[in-house]
Amino acid sequence: MKLLFYLLPVFAGVAITIQSGINSQLRTAIQHPLLAAFISFVVGTIALGILLIFSKEILPSLGEYSKIDWYKYTGGLPGAFVVTVTLI
């Protein structure tokens, strides 16, 4: 199990490199950087949704979300910015 924690950052680095190449090819194919970024995040959102469905972790109740400061929901904005700027 400890080995997995050493390998995950390596796999993440490889994934970022692959993601940039695939997104670049998508942008070239559709000639629209914002749409390419949108498609990238929609596909990622669907993948995460599937993982959540099969996850055995208990999700917080809906009431718990209202107790979270609003800015804590903005963590995806830097990622969207980076992907979009990369595609532009």
Image (cartoon, rainbow, N blue to C red):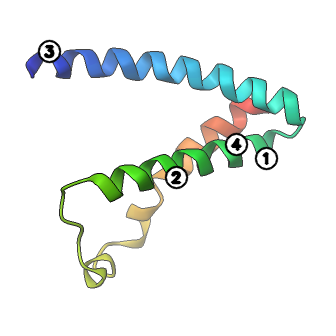
Closer to the N terminus: mark 3 or mark 2? 3
Label 1 vs label 2: CA separation? 16 Å
Give the x, y percent position of residue 68.
31, 73
Q: Quadrant of the C terminus?
A: top right
The residue located at (51%, 23%) in the rendering is 16
Label 2 vs label 4: CA separation? 14 Å
Residue 46: mark in rendering: 2
- Mark 2 or mark 4, which is nearer to you? 2
| Disc 2 residue type (three-letter) | Ile
The residue located at (86%, 40%) in the rendering is 32
Label 1 vs label 3: CA separation? 38 Å
The answer to whether 70 is drawn above or below residue 28 in the figure is below
Closer to the N terminus: mark 3 or mark 4? 3
Image quarter for residue 79? top right
| Disc 1 residue type (three-letter) | Leu
Q: Which residue is mark 3?
A: 3
Closer to the N terminus: mark 1 or mark 2? 1
Q: Which residue is mark 4?
A: 37
Label 1 vs label 4: CA separation? 5 Å
Mark 4 residue crowding within 10 angstroms, few (<14) / some (14–19) / many (20+)? many
